[in-house]
Image: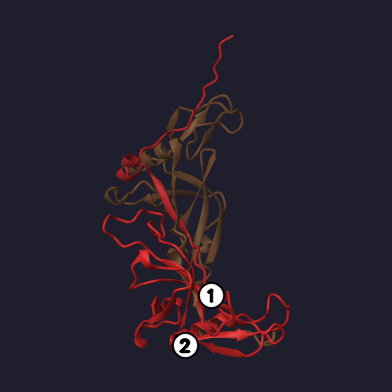
Chain colours: A brown, B red
Amino acid sequence: MAILERITRNIDNCIWNPGVEAFPVKNKYTAGVAGQKFFEELKSNGKICGTTCEKCQTTYVPGRIYCEQCFSRLDKWVDVGTEGILFSYTKVYKNKDGSGKENPTLMAAVKIADGLIMHRLGETNLDKLAIGIKVKAVLKEKTDRTGSINDISHFAIV
Amino acid sequence: MEDKTVISGGTALTDEEINSGKIFLTEDSLNCAYAWDAGVAIKHYLAELKKGKIIGKECKKCNRIMLPPRMFCELCFIPSGNWIYVKDTGIVNTFSICYVHWDASRIKPGEKPHLPAVIEIDGASPGMGIMHILGEVDPEKIKIGMKVKAVWKPEKDRTGSITDIKYFKPL
């Protein structure tokens, strides 16, 4: 077989295909100390919580256990409410795997206190959107919440 | 001066805590799928195994008949020549009586040991052999140089794999 003769159909050749299970590489990534507290509040009480660094006058959302400016340990948790302002948004035409979306969706960065939460936007009318408008988290029913960022169904314009 | 340093040593979690669902986590797995192309020579070799035949390839310079076949002679560095059918009989070149499984776990009491062996196939050049297993034989009676013959799977069960030969048995 000449070098230029390409094998175009792999199925014609004997290939050894052990499949996806050949290297079972699985991982579990925990939310961490602060994440655990944040999601627990979201799941059980429907609250979005942050931590405040009094020295730096900063409230992190989602809460962290360290201030990233002064490295202080943060243990003062505050309920920051479910409202925030639209910091940025983008229209998404593709799925995670690169295939086209039938109906484009809107993703938003919502500023709550001094933190940003990336989430879906319920609004589809671009004319109604402007950076700086108020948006509010729409939570799932308590029984449907699992302690994930998806416990917030989406953000809606107030 | 008061030392306000707080040392955080991380948080140990037990399996129970992880599995209880109380610890929030995301699970993911990497897609490590792969397929390994057998190549031109081995492709042909496996296709012939499916037919119940063993095929080698000759080197026109050193006159060796190479088994398994390869596309070039590794001694002469020239492309190999004709495809040559060899027999499905041979002699035991070396063997092992193996009391552990492939995953290194020990065989259970009463279980027969594995008998991997290198078989020099008749028709191929001396020393040309394939790694396989021996069967229908008392492990105590295996000898180097012993004549053996391939025991094939029924044709319908063959897949074009070295396991199309079930094992080699004494002749």
Q: Are the residues at dot 2 and dot 1 in contact (C-beta closer than 8 Å)?
A: no
* Residue where numbered disc 1 is placed: B129
Q: Is residue A43 left or right of residue B119?
A: left
Residue B113 locus on image (x, y percent): 35, 61
Q: Amino acid at mark 2?
A: Lys
User: Quick check: do tags 2 and 1 share a chain?
Assistant: yes
Q: Taking A100 as reference, is B80 above or below it?
A: below
**Residue at coordinates 53% horizontally, 57% vertically from top-left?**
A129
Q: Quadrant of the N terminus of chain B?
A: top right
Give the left or right position of residue B81, taking residue A19 as reference: right
Q: Label 2: which residue?
A: B53
Chain letter, disc 2 residue: B
- Depth check, front residue: A24 or A109: A24
Label 2 and label 1: CA atoms lie apart by 15 Å
Quarter of the picture containing the C terminus of chain B is bottom left
- Residue under the point 40% across and 71% down: B134
Residue at image point 41% right, 57% down:
B103
Write down the chain letter for disc 1: B
Q: Nearer the viewer, residue B95 or B39?
A: B95
Residue B137: x %, y % from top left? 34, 71
